[in-house]
Amino acid sequence: MISFRYHLVTIIAVFLALGLGVLMGTTVVKQSVVDNLRAAAERAINSNHALQKDVSELRAQLQQWDQAGKPLQHLLVQGQLGGDSVVLVTAEGVDFAEVNGVKNALTDAQATVTGVLAMTSLMALTQEAQRAQLEAILGLPQDSTPADVIRKAAESVAVRLSQGPPQTGQPDIITELSDGGFIVSRDVGKGGIAQVGGPSQPVVVLSGGAGAPAVAPSDFFVPLVSALVQSSHPVAAGETFDTDYEFVSLVRGDGTVDGNVLTVDDADMMFGRVALVLGLRDLLIDGPGACLDFGMKSGACDVVPSPPPTP
């Protein structure tokens, strides 16, 4: 006769066997998953290393082409902007050498750069005192948000650059921002800031660099470009090829301005500087055309503009 104890032991043995089988099966499955993940990770790492090597080689080749083409830059841009005046707007942190590279390309094209305006980190309004100071300059309510204040500053600068200096005795927003430390002006002529800007002076906005920007391009430069486009003022937006933060892609992605502003995503390279000059020439002569986005990044329609037809 089978006793209750036998049934109990049998049932326990069955459950133990079942539990052990589940445990073993789970262990096998987990190990298999781990092996598959490890193999996939190794493939991804190897692929990443290969891509990094390809990128390094391509960058080296690009730099070689850039160096080889630099002697040609002067010949390609010479006289293309003869008689034009240009305002260059940038920010602290943008490599001084790259700003000068763009400025020199414009000068080689026989354009007059009336001044370089660099936005400082104060424009980011990271402190309450800075926000209150800028609110007072702009005449805004004291409860304005930092984003609204920065955008209003960008729009005010755009109006000033498109219309030119105010009448005698009227406040000059660029002078006020300069006095407040929000803007640093360089390379202005004998006439000072008063000569910077006007209906006949296109604006070139240059951004890009390593690390965090002095002021986010989305907060200041994009509204600046947008306001200039809305006022039908010619404007070019450029950035360095290896920038850590976006600017040109934001402009290209803005449907309200894309197609009406010249963009160059490699303005620190010979090709980009040539594209900036020739593109600006076309924009001033013919207005917005089929292709205004140049460079080597997403959204570019060509590396450089097509040369003008030979007469």
Image (cartoon, rainbow, N blue to C red):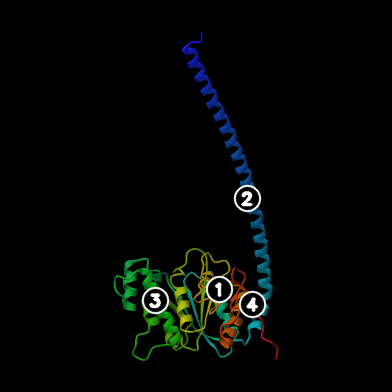
Q: Are marks 2 and 3 in contact (CB under 8 Å)?
A: no
Mark toward the viewer: 1 or 3:
3
Q: Between residue 101 and residue 206, name the one nearer to us.
A: 206
Residue with the mark numbered 3: 153
Specify whether 136 is left or right of 32: left
Dot 1 or dot 3, earlier in sequence: 1
How many residues crowd mark 4 within 10 Å: few (<14), some (14–19), many (20+)? many
C-alpha distance separating marks 1 and 4: 18 Å
Dot 2 or dot 3, earlier in sequence: 2
Specify whether 53 is left or right of 230: right
Dot 1 or dot 4, earlier in sequence: 1
Residue with the mark numbered 2: 44
Mark toward the viewer: 1 or 4:
4
How many residues crowd mark 1 within 10 Å: few (<14), some (14–19), many (20+)? some
Residue with the mark numbered 1: 98
C-alpha distance separating marks 4 and 2: 35 Å
Q: Amino acid at mark 2?
A: Ala
Residue with the mark numbered 4: 304
Q: Amino acid at mark 3?
A: Ala
C-alpha distance separating marks 4 and 3: 33 Å
